[in-house]
Amino acid sequence: MAEGDEHRVIQAAGAVVWRHGTAGLDVALVHRPRYDDWSHPKGKRRHGEHLLLTALREVKEETGFDVVLGRPLRRSEYQVSGGAKQVSFWAGHWAEPADFTPNDEVDELAWLPVATARGQLSYERDVALLDELAAGPLRTVPLIVLRHAEAGRKRNTAADEAAAEDLGRPLDTRGAADAQTLASVLASYGRCQVISSAAERCLATVRPYAQAAGVPVQPEPALTVVPGGVSPVALLAAVGRDGTGARNGRGGGRPDVLPGAGHGDGDSDGDGAGARLAAEIAVAGQPTLICAHRENLPVIIDAAFRALGAGPPPAEPLGKSEFWVLHSADGRLVAAERQSLTA
């Protein structure tokens, strides 16, 4: 190892790929002829690539499979000739059948029961990952809580115009680019229903993901923050916005909202309505993406964690385009991870 290489960090990602076999849990292992070893599919991160996308790409390249990522597993860290290698892993559910094609990097693929796979794996660190997967719930439900991307600056307007102006504030150039990137990154967790603040900057942040997933964006007054204590419901009716953030041409009216949920009305219980909604969604057992604001995200995140039987995370508030993913099973939190586009 060259001098200084030991301090170089090489980032990589992969997945412990699983499916339900005839006798229980099966996992997919790959054989690499270069090293003559059996391991979980993984590989190095490309420059500028998000690690979630690295995991999906490497699994696809090494196995031919598309997977949906579930809960994060332990990170493997070990020395290689080029420095210290850090490999992030997730549980990866086999999405659909696909043909495996041997190549120079991987010449064999095997679906094996857990007990057989333990004996086949070449490294103890990979055995530990397998045991971690088998010890916890296989299927988990993601609740993604996202802060909107960068938006244009607020303009100085008269007080009575400030709320409507803020509601319609669009993403700026960077924010629009981040929204496109988020569409791919968030898709790592599969197809989620999308519930958003009715502010245009929130709707625009999740719109590319929703379009790619083929789901509607559900604007929700309980998640909407407007300045000056103005009622989101009244404001939305006044400006006549529909679920896309555009004027609906119907002369006003309340936008579609989540049936049966509590809805904020802009008074002192506005945060409470958002918290109740987040708690209901957290335990509902349906994959969901929520997009909201800096002002109300702390109570939303706190409520979701508590509804799943966990304390709130001891972390700084989310930055623009950052998100938490709460992975749950049977209404209990199994794992949580915080992700950033710059990670």
Image (tube, helix red, strand yellow):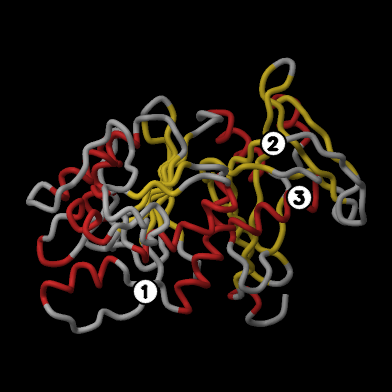
Under mark 1, the amino acid is: Ala
Image coordinates of residue 113 in percent, x first then y, are 73, 25
Taking the image as shown, residue 12 lies to the left or right of residue 240, namely right
* Circles 1 and 3 in contact, beta carbons < 8 Å: no
Label 2 – label 3 distance at C-alpha: 11 Å
Residue 317: quarter of image: bottom left
Asked whether the residues under the numbered discs 2 and 3 touch, taking CB atoms below 8 Å apart as contact, a structural biologist would say no
Q: Amino acid at mark 3?
A: Lys
- On the rendered structure, is 155 left or right of 17? left
* Residue furthest out toward the top: 23
> In the image shown, does 317 or 124 lie closer to the viewer?
317
Most foreground residue, 249 or 185:
249
Q: Which residue is mark 2?
A: 94
Q: Residue at x 71, y 55 (%)?
A: 57
Which of disc 1 and disc 2 is earlier in sequence? Answer: 2
Tell me the tag on residue 83: none
Q: Find disc 3 in the rendering and name its residue.
A: 60
| Element type where label 3 sits in the image | helix
Q: Residue at x 15, y 48 (%)?
A: 265
- Tell me which label, 2 or 3, sits earlier in the chain: 3
